[in-house]
Image (cartoon, rainbow, N blue to C red):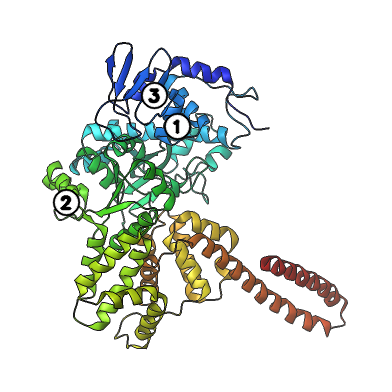
């Protein structure tokens, strides 16, 4: 039976929680008599109809009729379950919860709950130690100088708990072992190399603690500062851990959620430094994906609070590809999207340093709607000069129109396309309806054309399509593939090469579209396929990869069965006793392979 929080613990949390103080952090409240009043956070209003009763420990809105206890309020505002809201408020009130099995952690509800709590505690301690190394030691002085020269204030440095990991890669292990952590616990912490457990994963880097939505440190990111840049990735990031899932966590969400709720918008930006720059400039509704492409889960984290998503990715090719992909993901979840075009510098951190907070704020306020952004990029890529360009631009824009949830929006955007390219609306509508056939025709035309020295166009096999789909997702989807198959299971050499590159990126904590592109040669055609795959991202990527995994495993087993069958044929012609014994083993192998193939067909 699942363990649950005892009623006595729930009552204790309720008694020790000041409901006015908690709700007052989300809603400005004014006292009138014995009650407190403010504008309701659950619907738009100008006259305060939302009341909080200290005596009854209850809130109620006379406008939308929302009401309940402080637990209900936190559940609604933080999008937590009831047990999570109790745990959230218990931590704040300093109450140690008891569970129905008599313990202090829920053993059954989440098999790893105790372990998660222990690893959060470990990462919190390590973050504090790294922060001390940065701010108080001579060893961290150069990293402190670097971050100061980037314009990061002492207040911001303290808020985000930035740190420095020592250059001695054996120091951290020794330090933690003296704190009585077990070898097995440290081996599985993600802080040390899998191959060389005594060696720290992060060394001689500027450290960025990664917080969960409650403010607990759950992972780390580290920036390279000195040494041979060709041999070290610019950023190293924690992989998925028991307490941390990269694809469902957003950097700085714990700091940004209040501003996100108030502003009803969020900025998705490129990385740690950009996000920190926005916050230092007073734009506190900025968050960042964590070393990976933006995911559906990350969008769902903010969706309950926002009307608009603003995208602030780099202006290079990988950044623009990420922008286009993020637009489609957000629009599929019916969220309005705008794009921030940074004209004052290459990224928010540079603008903050060189021009100040006001300039960065103006850039944000000047963000344009995604349809205007996409059409401007299409006009750059396909000038309105030839019928072929008009056809290619239309097809590229159709992917965006497809992502819209409103027929009225679709109609308006198709009209906008017609105006931009001076084409007939009826013709565009016909092509939109028959977009699959149009896409095939254009691809055939491109294949027939002389490449003129450009990379060769690769044939997209099922195996190659599988790994390309994983590129468009995140490390989580690739890890799923990696657990089921290996590079040796691939028959397509290009798919095998891509799979190997992705494995290297995972090992280095650099799994992202840009990280993978950086490891591909210009001459083999893989870079072009990756960019095309990202632009044609499918909403059914996970199912597509699962189907491909089954196909790859089945084909690998068939090749293995052919090898075994050939060996059986040779053994059957032999009369030697040792060959007869080997023949029995081979026949057993063939039966086992046949069973595995049959299971994959189910």
Across and down, in percent, residue 45 comes to 27, 32
Residue in the image at 78% along x and 83% along y: 569
10 Å crowding of disc 3: few (<14), some (14-19), many (20+): some
Is 311 left or right of 69, judged from the image as shown? left
User: Gap between marks 2 and 3, in whole Å?
Assistant: 38 Å
10 Å crowding of disc 1: few (<14), some (14-19), many (20+): some
Residue in the image at 20% along x and 35% along y: 153
Across and down, in percent, residue 59 comes to 39, 22
- Residue 166, quarter of the rendered image: top left
Locate the N terminus by quadrant. top right
Across and down, in percent, residue 488 comes to 57, 69
- Reading the chain from its start, which is encountered first: label 3 or label 1? 3
Instruction: Assign a secondary structure to mark 2.
Output: loop
Residue in the image at 41% along x and 44% along y: 301
Q: Which residue bears the numbered disc 1? A: 75
User: Gap between marks 3 and 1, in whole Å?
Assistant: 15 Å
- Residue 531, quarter of the rendered image: bottom left
Whether residue 165 can be seen here? no
Across and down, in percent, residue 561 comes to 70, 75
- Reading the chain from its start, which is encountered first: label 2 or label 3? 3
Which mark is nearer the camera, 3 or 1?
Answer: 3
User: Gap between marks 1 and 2, in whole Å?
Assistant: 35 Å
Q: Which residue bears the numbered disc 2? A: 366
Front residue (pair 8, 291): 8
Instruction: Assign a secondary structure to mark 1.
Output: helix
Which mark is nearer the camera, 2 or 3?
Answer: 3
Q: Which residue bears the numbered disc 3? A: 60
Is 449 left or right of 212, judged from the image as shown? left
């Amino acid at each position: 039976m699942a363990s649950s929080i005892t009623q006595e613990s729930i009552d204790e949390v309720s008694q020790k929680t000041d409901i006015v103080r908690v709700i007052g952090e989300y809603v400005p409240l004014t006292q009138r008599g014995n009650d407190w009043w403010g504008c309701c956070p659950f619907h738009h209003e100008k006259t305060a109809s939302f009341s909080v009763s200290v005596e009854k420990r209850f809130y109620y809105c006379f406008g939308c009729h929302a009401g309940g206890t402080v637990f209900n309020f936190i559940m609604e505002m933080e999008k937590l379950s009831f047990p999570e809201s109790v745990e959230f408020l218990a931590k704040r009130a300093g109450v140690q919860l008891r569970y129905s099995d008599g313990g202090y952690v829920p053993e059954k509800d989440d098999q790893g709950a105790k372990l998660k709590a222990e690893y959060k505690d470990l990462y919190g301690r390590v973050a504090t130690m790294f922060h001390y190394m940065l701010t108080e030691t001579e060893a961290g002085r150069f990293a402190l100088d670097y971050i100061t020269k980037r314009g990061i204030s002492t207040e911001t440095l303290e808020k985000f708990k930035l740190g420095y990991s020592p250059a001695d890669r054996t120091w951290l292990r020794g330090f933690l072992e003296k704190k009585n952590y077990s070898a097995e616990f440290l081996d599985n912490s993600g802080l040390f190399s899998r191959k060389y457990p005594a060696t720290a994963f992060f060394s001689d880097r500027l450290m960025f603690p990664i917080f969960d939505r409650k403010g607990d440190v759950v992972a780390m990111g580290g920036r390279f500062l000195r040494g041979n840049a060709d041999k070290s990735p610019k950023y190293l990031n924690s992989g998925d851990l028991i307490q941390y899932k990269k694809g469902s966590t957003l950097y700085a969400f714990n700091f940004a959620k209040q501003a996100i709720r108030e502003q009803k918008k969020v900025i998705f930006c490129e990385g740690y430094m950009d996000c920190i720059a926005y916050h230092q400039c007073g734009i506190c509704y900025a968050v960042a994906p964590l070393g990976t492409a933006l995911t559906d889960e990350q969008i769902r984290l903010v969706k309950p609070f926002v009307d608009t998503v603003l995208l602030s990715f780099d202006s290079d090719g990988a950044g623009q590809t990420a922008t286009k992909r993020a637009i489609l993901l957000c629009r599929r979840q019916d969220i309005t999207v705008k794009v921030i075009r940074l004209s004052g510098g290459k990224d928010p951190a540079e603008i903050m340093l060189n021009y100040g907070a006001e300039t960065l704020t103006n850039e944000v306020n000047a963000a344009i709607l995604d349809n205007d952004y996409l059409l401007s990029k299409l006009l750059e890529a396909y000038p309105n000069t030839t019928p072929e360009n008009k056809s290619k631009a239309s097809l590229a824009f159709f992917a965006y129109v497809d992502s819209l949830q409103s027929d009225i929006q679709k109609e308006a955007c198709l009209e906008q396309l017609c105006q931009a390219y001076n084409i007939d609306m009826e013709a565009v509508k016909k092509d939109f309806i028959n977009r699959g056939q149009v896409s095939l025709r254009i691809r055939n035309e491109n294949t027939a054309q002389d490449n003129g020295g450009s990379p060769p166009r690769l044939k997209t096999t099922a195996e190659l399509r599988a790994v390309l789909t994983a590129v468009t997702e995140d490390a989580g989807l690739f890890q799923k593939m990696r657990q089921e198959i290996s590079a040796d299971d691939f028959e397509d050499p290009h798919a095998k090469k891509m799979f190997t590159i992705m494995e290297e990126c995972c090992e280095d904590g650099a799994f992202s579209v840009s990280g993978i592109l950086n490891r591909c040669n210009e001459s083999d055609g893989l870079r072009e396929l990756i960019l095309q795959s990202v632009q044609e991202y499918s909403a059914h990527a996970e199912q597509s990869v699962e189907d491909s995994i089954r196909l790859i495993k089945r084909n690998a087993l068939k090749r293995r069965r052919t090898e075994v069958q050939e060996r059986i044929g040779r053994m059957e012609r032999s009369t030697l006793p040792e060959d007869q014994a080997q023949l029995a083993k081979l026949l057993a192998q063939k039966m086992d392979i046949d069973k595995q193939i049959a299971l994959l067909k189910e």
